[in-house]
Image (cartoon, rainbow, N blue to C red):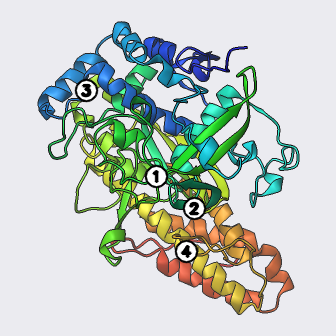
């Protein structure tokens, strides 16, 4: 019986959306027919975010947009020519890429399994269990109620294509902390570093077709001289030596696919249709190399140490999704934090019809540093060009002002609700653990409930404010006061100290709602005081 094989370039393993239908295709057909495909349709959003990066890396050589010596003007003109094509990618170039090394795309190749390390079968002390790979299944310290149908005591095989999706997510969003021990030479360790996208939120340009989307993902090279032939994806070269210092991050392939901190090896069944187990461990013990992901927003904290001053914006499922527009509306400025990801810095060079229809798919994965995954979330913006600073600077500034006001009042609401909770004499807190790198989640029950009520109100107010001139801080203060009022209505009648405590909270929100040049005083709910 031949060994199991699963060629991801040929097997229908990637779900795509064509009109109202979902189809499954291999990587070859996906790229050859990209101009007839609307978009990817993976049911695991972090895997889809990872796949966008992977496909962008593959498309760079296929389209000849991967020449670091090409002048920026020539690069932009070439991409514009490609965007104006109606027949998609050059199919000969697509097949030539995969035909150059077809074994490299076999998920279960005995020597070079795709984006895996066959040596783990000998270097790992034991297998990790299939549940450790599949997002949503209980494994180790993961929450068992996240998917109660799967437990450590009865791990079920997963279809090969679903194992592929989870492998993608593992390389980009994998945890830090303890993992299966791996011994290489004299080094033995079971310690992991977090994946390069863990706990982040990605902003992906989306066009009218997948072909257009992948061209919009391309970013011109702006770095120093790069050695010819130095850039490669992991499956385009021999398995890396885990003890050696990782090579420098090169553009575009190593930048997009070569920064994983994790190593994996899938264990298939005899047919190759399912994965029954996996080895999951570290790929390197060296510190990560500095790199700027072109689909992330970077925030700057001037008070932090130099090595931690610039960091990717964290995913936070507690906040409303309209906040994404703040990062997209303003043109890039190296002195201003939180502006567009690099993928959007060439928006002005796009053909007019492409620019007018450009939307953004937002994918955040709210995770703890080790093990636990809180929740992932996605959103799709309206076409952003009408809102962009270059097209409408007044509206862009308004969007940024409204987002800032919404966040300011959200923080003020949390603080006010916390203080009112304490002043009322209540001591029970929510049981969520501290959040590494993002402050504590142990807010009072009032704060958590009020914020859950506030953000939907804030989103509704945001879309109204974008097109009118009312002072934004006052409107969001009114939304915060209403949210607090609704949350604490019952407590006002039950708790003797609640009335004065909540009146002080409302006054603090009113003060927060008066920004410079913002004289509108919000009117609140039943707790509002004159």
Residue picked out by circle 4 = 439
| Residue 187 vertical placement versus 5 (above, below) | below
Residue 268 position, x and y percent, is: 71, 29
Query: Which numbered disc, 2 or 4, marks the residue closer to the eye?
Result: 2
- Can residue 357 be seen here? The reply is no
Query: Which numbered disc, 4 or 1, marks the residue closer to the eye?
Result: 1
On-image quarter of the C terminus: bottom right
Q: Of residues 148 and 211, which is closer to you in this image?
A: 148
Secondary structure category for the residue under label 2: strand
Secondary structure category for the residue under label 1: loop
**Disc 2/disc 1 C-alpha distance (Å):** 20 Å
- Going from N to C along the chain, the mark reached first, 4 or 3, is 3
- Going from N to C along the chain, the mark reached first, 2 or 4, is 2
**Disc 4/disc 3 C-alpha distance (Å):** 41 Å
**Disc 4/disc 1 C-alpha distance (Å):** 21 Å
Give the residue at x 75% y 61%. 141
Give the residue at x 78% y 51%. 138
Residue picked out by circle 1 = 196
Dot 2 crowding, Cα within 10 Å, few <14, some 14–19, many 20+: some
Secondary structure category for the residue under label 3: loop
Q: Of residues 6 and 389, which is closer to you in this image?
A: 6
Tag 2 near tag 3, CB within 8 Å: no
Dot 3 crowding, Cα within 10 Å, few <14, some 14–19, many 20+: many
Q: Quadrant of residue 424?
A: bottom right
On-image quarter of the N terminus: top right
215 vs 511, left or right, is left
- Can residue 416 be seen here? The reply is yes
163 vs 327, left or right, is right
- Going from N to C along the chain, the mark reached first, 4 or 1, is 1
| Residue 473 vertical placement versus 463 (above, below) | below
Residue picked out by circle 2 = 189
Query: Which numbered disc, 4 or 3, marks the residue closer to the eye?
Result: 3
């Amino acid at each position: 019986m031949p060994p199991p094989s699963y060629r991801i370039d040929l097997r229908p393993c990637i779900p795509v959306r064509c009109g109202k239908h979902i189809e499954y295709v291999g990587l070859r057909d996906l790229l050859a027919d990209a101009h007839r495909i609307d978009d990817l349709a993976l049911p695991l959003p972090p895997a889809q975010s990872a796949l966008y990066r992977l496909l962008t890396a593959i498309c760079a050589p296929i389209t000849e947009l991967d020449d670091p010596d090409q002048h920026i003007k020539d690069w932009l003109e070439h991409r514009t020519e490609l965007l104006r094509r109606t027949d998609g990618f050059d199919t000969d170039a697509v097949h030539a890429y995969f035909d150059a090394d077809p074994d490299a795309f076999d998920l279960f190749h005995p020597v070079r399994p795709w984006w895996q390390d066959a040596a783990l079968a000998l270097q790992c002390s034991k297998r990790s269990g299939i549940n450790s790979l599949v997002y949503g299944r209980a494994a180790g310290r993961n929450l068992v109620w996240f998917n109660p149908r799967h437990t450590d005591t009865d791990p079920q095989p997963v279809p090969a294509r679903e194992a592929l999706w989870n492998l993608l997510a593992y390389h980009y969003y994998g945890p830090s902390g303890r993992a299966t021990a791996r011994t290489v030479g004299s080094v033995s360790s079971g310690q992991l570093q977090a994946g390069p996208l863990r706990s982040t939120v990605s902003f992906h340009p989306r066009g009218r077709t997948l072909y257009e989307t992948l061209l919009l993902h391309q970013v011109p090279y702006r770095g120093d001289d790069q050695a010819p032939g130095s850039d490669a994806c992991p499956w385009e070269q021999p398995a890396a030596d885990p003890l050696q210092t990782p090579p420098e991050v090169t553009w575009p392939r190593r930048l997009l696919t070569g920064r994983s901190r994790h190593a994996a090896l899938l264990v298939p069944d005899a047919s190759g249709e399912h994965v029954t187990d996996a080895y999951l461990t570290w790929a390197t013990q060296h510190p990560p190399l500095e790199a700027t992901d072109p689909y992330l927003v970077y925030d700057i904290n001037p008070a932090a140490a130099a090595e931690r001053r610039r960091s990717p914006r964290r995913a936070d499922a507690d906040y409303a999704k309209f906040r994404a527009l703040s990062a997209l509306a303003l043109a890039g400025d190296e002195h201003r934090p939180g502006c567009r990801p690099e993928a959007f810095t060439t928006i002005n060079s796009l053909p007019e019809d492409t620019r007018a229809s450009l939307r953004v798919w937002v994918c955040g994965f709210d995770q703890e540093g080790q093990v636990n995954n809180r929740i992932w979330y996605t959103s799709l913006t309206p076409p952003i060009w009408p809102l962009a600073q270059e097209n409408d600077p007044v509206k862009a500034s308004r969007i940024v002002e409204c987002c800032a006001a919404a966040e300011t009042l959200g923080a003020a609401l949390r603080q006010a609700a916390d203080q009112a909770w304490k002043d009322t004499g209540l001591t029970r807190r929510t049981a969520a653990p501290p959040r590494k790198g993002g402050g504590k989640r142990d807010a009072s029950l009032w704060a958590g409930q009020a914020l859950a009520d506030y953000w939907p109100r804030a989103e509704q107010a945001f879309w109204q404010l974008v097109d009118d001139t009312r002072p934004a801080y006052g409107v969001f203060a009114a939304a915060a006061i209403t949210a607090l009022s609704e949350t604490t209505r019952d407590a006002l009648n039950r708790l003797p100290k609640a009335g004065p405590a909540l009146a002080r909270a409302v006054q603090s929100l009113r003060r927060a709602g008066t920004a410079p040049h913002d004289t509108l005083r919000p009117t609140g709910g039943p707790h509002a005081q004159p």
